[in-house]
Amino acid sequence: MAKIVVAGCGHGGLVAATKLARAGHEVTVYEKAPRQEIGHPQSDAFDYDTFTYADLPVAPYFRRGGNVITFVPPGADNEPLTIPALENESYIVDRKELINYLVELAEEAGVEILFEKEATAPIILGNRVAGIVVDGEKIYCDMVIDACGVSSPIRSQLPDFMGVNRAVEKYDVVHSYRAYFSRTDAPDPRHNYQLYLQEDGTVGFSWLITEIDRTDALICRFYYPEDSEVLDALRIVQEKNPQMGKDMIYGGSRSVIPVCQPLGMLVADGYAAVGDSAFMTIPVKGSGITYSIKAGKMLADCILKDTEGFFDTESLWEYQRRFFKELGFGACHLAIIKNILPYLTTAQVDEIFRLKLVSTEEIQDIMSNTANAIFTPKGLAATREKIRLAGNNTVIKDILSSIAVWIGKFFVIEAAFPTKYDRSDMQKWLRRYNNFFVSIKKPE
């Protein structure tokens, strides 16, 4: 059996570790944080089928349900757009409880988890990742699973020839501040989840979720917001929502969340990235729980099929293929939609709502972790109709025309994905994939 090292306590890494340890592999996880500090102090939703897909038991405290989301446009004259909840299609869970549950499952399976041990670099021997450096000590192994997060020091120091690393650029991540505040005795709002689009697309957004005994405030920006800006944004949210009290119950944490397309290359000889390390989040929502857990199962399945223990790019390619076919291309569709935001001013967002160029069904499709309906011939025809409805607004017409072109170009890239590993084909496809997403970014 193989010696497998997991760098970081990410969701996908823990799932893969659990599956591999149950099959008899020697698996060790190195996590830089103390055990009591892992996980964000906040609640989030993930798809109902996530644990079933991963063949893992559902914890009894996972609660079913979903929020009714209301998009609030900038202009006071425009009606908010409310998206009905997809009943019973998601679980809502405290992230600290979730990550600790996954830790417990891993330990029960025989995984050794070492906390306060920081992985700082990969060990490269020839063309292969042969281990990691942990607190200055070299740890050699047969296979490295990178679950260190968006700023992974393992991925970021891989040699260029592996094709895995991709620098994080502007609009690839959001900087979030999230805290839970007291709940006043003001009457319940019509809908409990208010998402505010009052900010310029190049800035970010805010939300408030009103619950029975608390309110959940989130401030997201495409840059690091100083404390004074966070306080101003919270004040604006509070003015719009009398249900939000002034006392912070807990939270106040900051995090960096990838909101971009997945890595084009997930694997190398002796290495695989999973979760935030591979930018496996839902680009318009920022949550990576579903993608990461499912990808962890895919990765474990792939490793277990390699009975020869090669763990090279070719034997790991099935993980790459399966992720993109089942989840990755859907994430790419959402990333393309997300890339519209930096091109829009507040006034243009308002005009899109006024002209009713975005339908409830389209946003519901996006919030269901996919934009697949838009990426069809029918969806492309709908985009052309929106161009007509934009009338004399040349800026919005140009943006919609760009979307139609982007969709057409990505059709070709998606169809050209190499389902069987061939180094030359893979490198050619990877260049096209990376160059496409560079080309659609708003110039600085």
Image (cartoon, grey):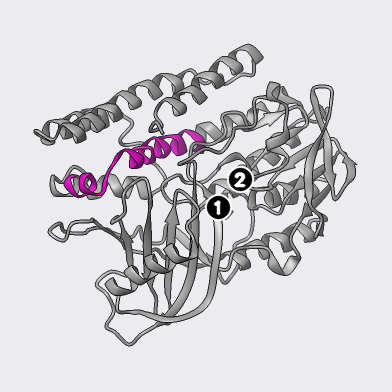
Q: Nearer the viewer, residue 19 or 36?
A: 36
Which residue is painted at 45% across and 77% down in the image?
181
Which image quarter: residue 425? Answer: top right
Q: Amino acid at mark 2?
A: Val
Which residue is painted at 63% across and 60% down in the image?
57
| Residue that mark 2 sits on | 150
Image position of 312 (left or right of 319):
right
| Residue that mark 1 sits on | 256
Q: Is residue 335 magenta?
A: yes
Image position of 273 (left or right of 89):
right
Task: Give x and y (percent) for residue 409.
Answer: 37, 21
Quick check: can you spot residue 232?
A: yes
| Residue extent of the magenta highlight | 327-351
Q: Amino acid at mark 1?
A: Val
Task: Give x and y (percent) for residue 307.
Answer: 81, 30
Which residue is painted at 14% across and 49% down in the image?
354
Residues under numbered marks 1 and 2 in contact, where contact means CB atoms less than 8 Å apart:
yes
Q: Quadrant of the N terminus?
A: top right
**Magenta span: chief secondary structure:** helix
Task: Give x and y (percent) for residue 318.
Answer: 64, 28
Return the residue found at the far bottom: 185
